[in-house]
Amino acid sequence: MAIGIKIKLNEGLYQRDPQETRLGQKIIKHSILLIDEIGFEAFNFKKLAIHMESTEASVYRYFENKHMLLLYLVSWYWEWVSYLIDFNTMNIEDPKRRLKIIIETLVYASKEYPAIDYVNESVLHRIIIAEGTKAYHTKAVDKENTEGFFLNYKKLSDKVAKVISELKPDFPYPQTLASNLFEMANNQIYFAQHLPRLTDVHVTDENFDEVEEMLEYFAFSLLGCNEKIKQ
């Protein structure tokens, strides 16, 4: 059963908040399914309109273009992961235990209980892995950054970096490690699925245990605390 939360995103990402109407929710639902099916390059609003049995004009009332739609979906996912980290680490005082939970959450966020019934987190996770970097590896990234479009990602990184600094206050690269944990989680899954010679981990049937173990190895080795974590 879906839980009752609303993901708060930068208003500049959309023309009209799709979370507020049934049509907007339908656009989100079908865009996730269609991008996963045909890829972002082949995706366009005409195909989306056909897929959801609506019109292109109706989609443009919510999003300026497909790049903004992708950025919306990626931002939604960042905010969802941030919410899960807060939920999963609630009342956990040990920073090492919290970091372990964070790593597990980064890898397996799509396996958590569903947040909203019109968002398939498992399918969205596949999009993040395959297409996510296309939202910010663009010529417009600096302009979009000044408009605050990446604040959800920055806040997520800050949240993880604070736990890293709490665990090892003299560690010089908490933000670097935090952002790399997220990027590595997605990149190594992608490599394992498509370019296996670029990684040492294996994934099968969305079992990402080796990715989780790899992230823990890197993080806790760098932080000098590889001893077993108390459950």
Image: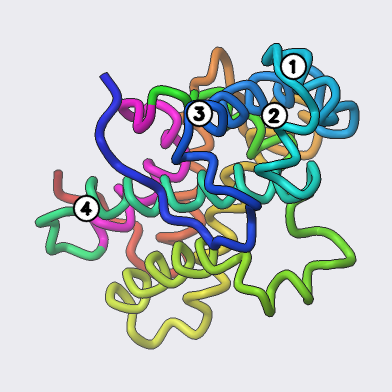
Give how far apart the Cα atoms at labels 3 and 2 are. 10 Å
At 51% from the left and 56% from the top, the residue drawn is 218
Along the line of sight, the residue nearer the viewer: 229 or 36: 36
Image spot of residue 216 (x, y percent)? 43, 50
The range drawn in magenta is 96-116
C-alpha distance separating marks 2 and 4: 28 Å
Sequence order check: which comes first, mark 4 or mark 3? Answer: 4
- Asked if the magenta segment contains residue 110, the reply would be yes
Q: Which residue is under mark 3?
A: 208
- Location of residue 174 with respect to 9 vertically, above or below: below
- SS at mark 1 in the image: helix
Q: Who comes first in sequence, dot 2 or dot 1? A: 1
Residue that appears at 50% across and 65% down: 178
Query: Separation of disc 3 and disc 1 at Cα?
Result: 21 Å
Magenta-span inclusion, residue 53: no
Q: Tags 4 and 1 in contact by the CB under 8 Å rule? A: no
Q: Residues within 10 Å of mark 4 (few under 14, many from 20)?
A: some
Indicate which disc, 3 or 1, sits on the residue closer to the N terminus: 1
Marks 2, 1: nearer the viewer: 1
Q: Position of residue 10 (x, y in %)?
A: 54, 62
Which part of the image, by quadrant, shows the N terminus?
Answer: top left
Q: Which residue is mark 4?
A: 89
